[in-house]
Amino acid sequence: MSSHNGHFGRVTVEVPRAAQAPVQRVVEVVARRPVNAYVELTLAAPEIAERAEPGQFVAFAIGGATSALLLRRSIAIAGADDGVVTVVVAPHGPGSTWLSERRRGDSVDVVGPLGRPFPAAPAGARALLVGGGYGAAALVGLAARLRTDGHPVDAVAGAASADRLCSVPELTDVADRVEVTTDDGSAGRRGMVTLAVDEMLADAGVVYACGPMPMLRAVADAATARGVPSYVAVEESMACGIGVCMTCVLPVIGEDGRTRFSRSCTEGPVFGGDRVRFADVGRLPHDVVGADAMGVVAP
Amino acid sequence: MTAVETGMDMRTALGGVEIPDPVLTASGCSAFGRELEPFVDLTAIGAVVTKSVQLRPRSGRPTPRMAETPSGMLNSIGLQGPGIHGLLADDLPWLAERGARAFVSIAGTRVEHFAELAERLRGVPGVLGLEVNISCPNVESRGEVFACDPVAASDVIAAVRAAADPAQPVYAKLSPDVTDIVAVARACADAGADGLSMINTLLGLVIDPDTMRPVLGGVTGGLSGPAIRPVALRCVWQVHAALPDVPILGMGGIRSGLDALQFVLAGASAVSVGTAVFNDPSAPARISAELATALADRGFAALTEAVGYAHRDSA
């Protein structure tokens, strides 16, 4: 079994770049559908749809050319088919609320597809997909691709409460087994996703997850403890989404065993679950490359 | 409409070096240019101003590094970067292979560091010139920022000018967080600066009302974006009025061609587009086209005719 803290013997590969470069387009909203606490927007964006791979995201400009909200909002691609791209918007601040209020016929400025997609599953592996809240939307395209490639697929969707669940019908359509958990028991089993993950991991040859950081950490640790490779799509806050602002970094262990502050947008959002140093997010450990130049030295 | 379609002569110069277009990226806002390639023709813009490099690789600060503010943002990245070795091995050759011009921002905490960086950049292919980021703490002056002291600022600029390739213009990047920016500008020009980049970010703070603590890991951060544009424009105006022969690379909240035009009219002979790139990755090319149209609409035949034009009644 691999050692989570050691520098070698990691069970994941460094996730390769996407095959195609992103584009920036002003596109039309062709459908809007409230889904529980979220809003699903469908965009006529053929050049993004044809380039997109599961795990990638798009970045929206908010509010037009004179908007006081300058930073792009990055949102996982939930579907990319037949010239349209689907995203699930969770309104929580002024930018995501503006986006969630777009109507059919409105235009939005969007850049994508961005980031590195989920890598393929090992040959013959049964895949376990774990989504937290609206993070489950990022797994729908992946589930379909895995099935097409002949992999059996299990899925766990979890949320704080029933209204925060997402993409359960879509995952149910393609997965062999789907488990639902909620913190308050208002849908599925009461508890965290790890309740179901711990049971289903026994059969899994690879794990894919998207959701809040504490969930990703728990799922990645559980998978790594069993020697199962896991790939997590992080939801780190980003200013640009394209790799120029350097705000979305996480401490990530590279192929050479060294930890760097890696950009979630261009070096992620998908990382090997045993490569993200979750406990050190928001800290500057002395062994991060370049920490010495910041005056941080080994204790 | 592009400059070609308007027939506008957009040529300008950085120090003595001619560039075909007056719109550049801004240091720290376009990394080393690579990520903009899908959105902007990097050879058509004036230059890629690279993220400030220091001698050694730097991790930068822990997150959170960013907070959105009204018409702007606060950042506290901590100059994450590859160090001069990585820049010379990787990033500058990538730009040079494509024919993109690099205006290399250098940073340090001692005068000798700046000089060594300038020395290592002598004769490097594709390096058009140097922008000296003096908004760094000076370890020999209890961390006082070089740019806030005319003597410290001129020490750095004199050392860089002496060490740098004579063919590479040296621009001093000034901080607006000073009582008298003209005094610092004059000190830098007297020390041999071939031009001035104005302005760097303003120091700011955001507190999270829920946690009741500063949002940024680094506590304070640099404020950028259209929110600071009037401050930047005032700085350019004051310095151009006092030092009309010193070239100015203007920056601070430029988001449109009309914003860029204001800087040109105030005295900038070129402009950098920074935070706007986060909002619109094609902004440098778009702003250049919009500026060309704006100049044509006002009867100018060339960009250089408009530089400082707003001062015409103050002479």
Image (cartoon, coloured by chain):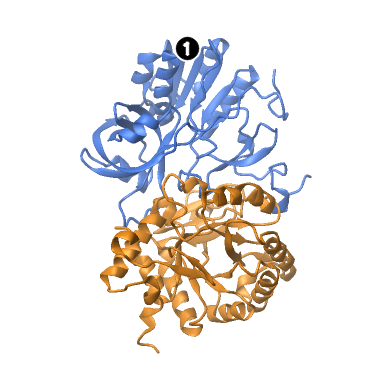
**A243 up-or-down from B4: above or below:** above
**A200 up-or-down from A101: above or below:** above
**Chain coloured orange here:** B
Subunit that carries the residue with mark 1: A
Residue A84 x, y percent position in the rendering: 30, 31
Residue A24 x, y percent position in the rendering: 36, 43
Camera-side residue: A244 or A179?
A244
Furthest-right residue in this view? A299
* Quarter the C terminus of chain B occupies: bottom left
Camera-side residue: B276 or B105?
B105
Residue A226 x, y percent position in the rendering: 63, 16
Tag 1, which secondary structure? loop
Number of marks in picture: 1
> Dot 1 surroundings within 10 Å: few (below 14), some, or many (20 or more)?
many
Q: Which residue is mark 1?
A: A151
**Chain coloured blue here:** A
Left-right relation of A1 to B103: right
